[in-house]
Amino acid sequence: MGYFRPEIEAIAGYKPGEQPQGGKFIKLNTNENPYPASPKVADAIRARLDQGLEKYPDPIGTAFRIRAAEVLGVEPDWILCGNGSDDILTILTRGFVGDGEWLRLPTPSYILYKTLADIQGADSEEIQFNDDWTLPESFGTASNHLKLAFLPNPNSPSGTVVPKDQLRAIANSLPCPLLIDEAYADFADDNCIDLVRENEKIMVSRTLSKSYALAGLRFGFVVAQPHMIEQLMKVKDSYNCDALSLAGAIAAIDDQKWVAENKAKVVATRARMTGRLRSLGFTVPDSQANFIWATRPGVKLKPIYEFLKANHVLIRYMQYPGITEGIRISVGTDGQSDVCLDLIEQYLQQNP
Ligand code: PMP
C-alpha cells in the first residue's frame, strides 16, 4: 500500500490470545480470573450509570488515585491510570523510546513489548532467560541507545520471579528507567512497590484484569515517582479511562478482602495443578502467578492443545523458536482445572 510508516507495514502486529465469545469453552488461555469480581464493582458501575454519561470523566482518575494510594502506601500523585496495563505499556514506550533507540526486554516473556518498540521504530534488545528462568546479569548492562527496559515480574509464560535484590542491582546499573510489569504480582509472595520509593528509575505497573477478575473492564495503572508521572500525563490520551471503568476500579481496589480471598483460592489450585502436571511427567517451574508453564522434551505439545480445544478447553501453546516450547495453563476453578488435567492425562494415555 505504501500509505503507512514503513515500520508499521513491516510488522505482523500483536495478536492477543484466542477470545471466543459465547461461553463454549473452559477458558484457561489468557490468565483471566475464573471467579466473578467483587459484587461491589457491578453496584458501583450501575450507580455511576444512573448519573448519566453525557459529561467527560475525570481525566486523571482522582478518586481512584486517592484510594489506590492508600492501599499501596504511596501518595496519589505517584499513580497514573490506564485503559488496562497494555495502555500503560504503550504510554511508557511512547514517552521514553524513539526512532532508532532501544527497548530492552527479556525473552521468553510478554510478546507485546516487542510490538510496541516496533511501532515506535525502535529496536528491541532481547536478553534470554537462563534455562532455569533466572535472569542473566547482562539485563542491567548500560548502553548508549538504551532508553527503557521492561521486565514482567512474575514473568509470563514461566510464572517465575526475579529476586528483589537483583532487580535493585539491575535498576542501579541501567542508564534508563525500568518498568517492572506486575500484572500478576497480587498472586505472588512479594512485590516491588517499595523499590519505586528507592529509585526514581523504577516504575511498577499493575492491572485489574487478573487479580481483580476484571479483564473485561480495562483498567490498569503505573506507580512511579511524581516527576515521572507528571511527564507521562502528557503522553496519555486525555480521557484514557472512561467513567464506568473508573467507578468499577474504585470499588474493586476498595475491596481488598475480596482480593485476599481470591488469591488464597487461586494459589491453592495452582499448587494442586503444579503437583499433578509434575506427576504426569511435565517440567513445571514454581509459579507465583495465576498460570503455570509446562514443558516436556520429547513429547509434541501442540497436539495436546488441539486435543483440549476439540474438547472445549482452551489453553495456550507457545513456541519461542530456538529457545523453548510449552503449554501455559491459567489457573481455573478446581472443577475447571480438573477437567483440563483429566483430559491431558487421557491424551497421554492414548498417545504414549
Ligand atoms: N503484562 C503482562 C505480563 C501480561 O501478561 C498482560 C496480559 N496479557 C498484560 C500486561 C496486560 O494486561 P491488561 O492490558 O489486561 O491490563
Image (cartoon, rainbow, N blue to C red):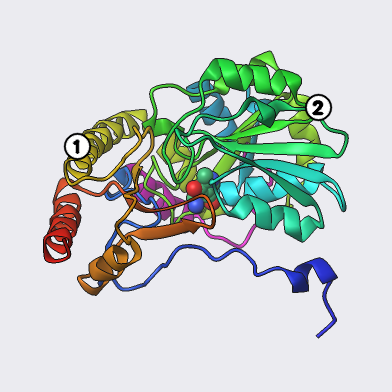
273 is within the stretch colored magenta: no
Element type at marker 1?
helix
> Can residue 25 be seen in the rendering of this structure?
no
The three-letter amino acid code for the residue at tag 1 is Gly
Q: Residue at x 51, y 26 (%)?
A: 162
Name which quarter of the figure residue 345 lies in: bottom left
Left or right of residue 265: residue 171: right
Q: Nearer the viewer, residue 234 or 164?
A: 164
Q: Is residue 140 above or below residue 240?
A: above
**What is the spatial separation of the Cα atoms under label 2 and label 1, in whole angstroms?**
41 Å
Where does label 2 land, which residue? 175
> Can residue 116 be seen in the rendering of this structure?
yes
| Magenta residue span | 40-62
Q: Residue at x 54, y 46 (%)?
A: 109
The three-letter amino acid code for the residue at tag 2 is Pro
> If the image is split into quadrants, where does the N terminus sit?
bottom right
Q: Is residue 169 above or below residue 46?
A: above
Where does label 1 land, which residue? 275
